[in-house]
């Protein structure tokens, strides 16, 4: 998905049936940094080795069987088992593009770089971005962080604003 700046002269209307192009601010700001962090973690989740965004476990594929498969195996009908195995093999996984991976590599290090003297803030910003990429609601994220939702939002916003200020100090192009 390409990102385009909406010119002020362009006449886009929400009832035209065309999705709005993404707005890119002229300078980095907190909400835009948060959007890019979430996008980076979503890209990380789509890579083949996504150990950082998912829980630790086995590298073997998961096999589930329901009663009909056990019953089919008992009576000697292997067709159901073959159909299940074929469906597992035919699963399609969309891999991220080179542009998405390049952006992800740049974005993932921002909390550690720009929040260096504030480890708790870096943890909150990173955790919120990682779990928002997995579509967790903010209330559940705050519970996981053992903070109130208002405090987690306030700290997350403060951290995102600090990262945006650091990106504006350095000549990092807005994407």
Image (cartoon, rainbow, N blue to C red):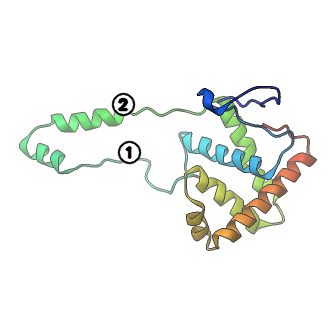
- Which label number is shown at residue 168? none
Residue 125 vs 46, above or below: the answer is below
At 64% from the left and 73% from the top, the residue drawn is 148
Instruction: Give residue 121's position: percent from left, percent from top.
Output: 75, 65
Residue 146 vs 108, above or below: the answer is below
Q: Earlier in the sequence, mark 2 or mark 1?
A: 1
Quadrant of the rendering where the N terminus is positioned: top right
Residue 173 vs 35, above or below: the answer is above
At 63% from the left and 47% from the top, the residue drawn is 41
Classify residue 158 as left or right of residue 13. right
Seen from the viewer's position, the closer of residues 56 and 37 is 37
Quadrant of residue 144 within the rendered picture: bottom right
Seen from the viewer's position, the closer of residues 29 and 53 is 29
Task: Check disc 1: other Cα within 10 Å, few if <14, some if 14-19, many if 20+.
Answer: few
**Is residue 99 among what the camera can see?**
yes
- Which label number is shown at residue 61? 1
Instruction: Give residue 146's position: percent from left, percent from top.
Output: 61, 74
Residue at image mark 2: 90
Classify residue 162 as left or right of residue 17. right
Alpha carbon of mark 2 to alpha carbon of mark 1: how far?
Answer: 13 Å
Assign a secondary structure to mark 1. loop
At 55% from the left and 57% from the top, the residue drawn is 136
Assign a secondary structure to mark 2. loop
At 66% from the left and 35% from the top, the residue drawn is 100
Quadrant of residue 143 within the rendered picture: bottom right
Quadrant of the rendering where the C terminus is positioned: top right
Instruction: Give residue 91's position: percent from left, percent from top.
Output: 39, 34
């Amino acid at each position: 998905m390409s990102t385009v700046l909406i010119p002020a002269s362009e006449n886009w209307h929400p009832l035209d049936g065309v999705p709005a192009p993404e707005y890119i601010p002229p300078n980095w700001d907190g909400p835009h940094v948060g959007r890019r962090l979430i996008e980076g973690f979503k890209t990380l989740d789509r890579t083949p080795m996504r150990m950082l965004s998912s829980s630790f476990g086995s590298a073997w594929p998961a096999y589930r069987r329901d009663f009909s498969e056990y019953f089919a195996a008992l009576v000697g009908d292997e067709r159901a088992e073959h159909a299940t195995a074929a469906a597992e093999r035919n699963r399609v996984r969309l891999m991220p593009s080179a542009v998405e991976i390049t952006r992800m590599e740049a974005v993932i290090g921002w909390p550690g770089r720009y929040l260096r003297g504030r480890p708790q803030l870096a943890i909150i910003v990173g955790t919120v971005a990682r779990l928002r990429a997995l579509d967790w609601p903010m209330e559940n994220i705050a519970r996981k962080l053992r903070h109130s939702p208002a405090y987690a939002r306030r700290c997350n916003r403060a951290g995102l604003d600090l990262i945006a200020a650091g990106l504006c100090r350095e000549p990092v192009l807005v994407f």
